[in-house]
Amino acid sequence: MARKIVVTSGKGGAGKTTLCANLGLALARLSQRVLLMDMDIGLNNLDVVMRVEDKVVFDFIDVVENRCRPSQALIQDENEPTLYIMPSCHLAKRQITADAVKKVLNRLSEGFDYILLDCPAGIDIGFRRAVNCADEAIVVVTPHLSGVRDADKTITELQQHFIGVSVVVNRVRGDLIAEGEMLSPFEVFSILGHTALGVIPENDDVNCNLNLHLSRQPFDILANNLVTGSQDMYDCVSRYKGFFGRIKRRFKRNV
Amino acid sequence: MNSKEYKRAQSMVLMDKYNLARTEFFKQLAELASRHFEYDGMTVDTYNGENLNVVITISVKKVKQSLKPSV
C-alpha cells in the first residue's frame, strides 16, 4: 500500500507544486514508485511544472467520473521510469467528493510506494477533499510572518483530520538568515512545533521556468528523511558566514 | 541569536492559537514570578504536544520565602 501524502500550505506561492514535483523526482531517484496527483481543480499546474502539459489526454476528473481507467490518465516521466503524473483539469462539471477520489486512490495504491497529492491553496473545500484522501501531510511554509501564520492555521485544520504533520521550510535565504533579517528554519520549526522534515533554499531557477531538476541535494535530503525517518537538514547559512560570506551577502543583497 | 522577526512570529501564533495577548501575558507572568522568585530572565516557547503547549523557562537566582515550606 502506498503512503498517501498531501502537500499543502494554506498560503499561495509557498511552493507546494514545485516541492511536490521535485520531491517526487527525488523519491524516484531512490527507486521508489511515485505518483504525483494534482488535486487542484481549476488552478492546476503540476502538469506544467512536470513539463507534460502536451501529453495530457485524460485527467483525474475523467477517472473519477468513469470516462477512463486510472492507468489511462497516468503519464510516465521521461527521465524517471518509476515516476507517474496524474494531471487535473480546469473545471469539473459536477462536485467531486473525497470518497470518489479515495476510491481511485485505493485502486492505484497497490502499484505505488508514494502518492503525493498536490493540494490547492486555501483551507476550503479543495483543501478538505485532498486532506480527506491522505494519511500524512507535508506543510510547506515560507520563512515569513504571513507564511508562518497561515501554516499554523493549516496545521490546526490538519489536526482535526487526525493525520500526521511534518513541516518543510521552503524558499530559505541563507544570506538574510546570516544577517538576522529572516526567520531561520529552526525558528519556524520551533514556532510550529511539528516534525521537521526539511529545508529548501530559495532558487532563482524557479523564476526562469526551470522548475524541475533544481539543485538536487536539498530534495535528495528531504526524500531520504521521508523514506528513512531521519532528520538531516540542508545547510543554507554556513556559506554566508565569515569574511567571504559577508562579501557574498552584500553581492546577493544588492543584486 | 534569534532573528528580528522571531518574537513577532511567536506572539502571532500565541495570539491566534491560544487567544493570548503576549504583552499582557508576559506582564502577568512577570508579576507572578517576581512574587516567588528573584530571577535573571524568562523565555516562553510554544510546543505542540498532546498535553503541553507552552513551555516557560525561568532562570531563578533565589527562591523567596513565600514559596519555601513553612517549618
Image (cartoon, rainbow, N blue to C red):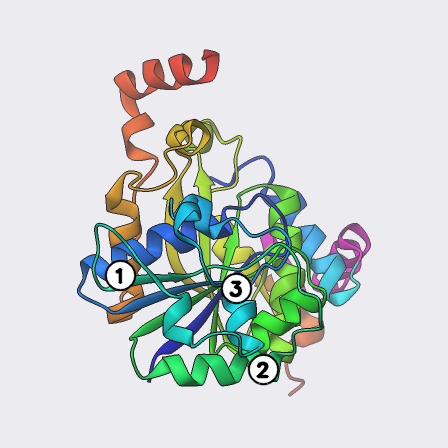
Three-letter residue code for mark 3: Gly
Residue A149 appearing in the image: yes
Quarter-of-image position of residue B30: bottom right
Residue designated by label 3:
A193
Is residue B2 placed above or below A193 in the rendered structure? above
Q: Secondary structure at mark 2?
A: helix
Q: Which residues are magenta?
A: B21-42
Measured Cα–Cα span from mark 2 to mark 3: 33 Å
Quarter-of-image position of residue A9: bottom right
Q: Are marks 3 and 1 on the same chain?
A: yes
Report the chain holding disc 1: A
Residue A123 inside the magenta-drawn segment: no
Residue designated by label 2:
A100
Residue A231: x and y in percent read 30, 62
**Dot 2 and dot 1 residues touching (CB under 8 Å):** no
Near mark 1 (Cα within 10 A), the count class, few <14, some 14-19 or many ≥20, is many
Residue B14: x and y in percent read 70, 59
Three-letter residue code for mark 1: Leu
Residue designated by label 1:
A27
Residue A85: x and y in percent read 38, 60
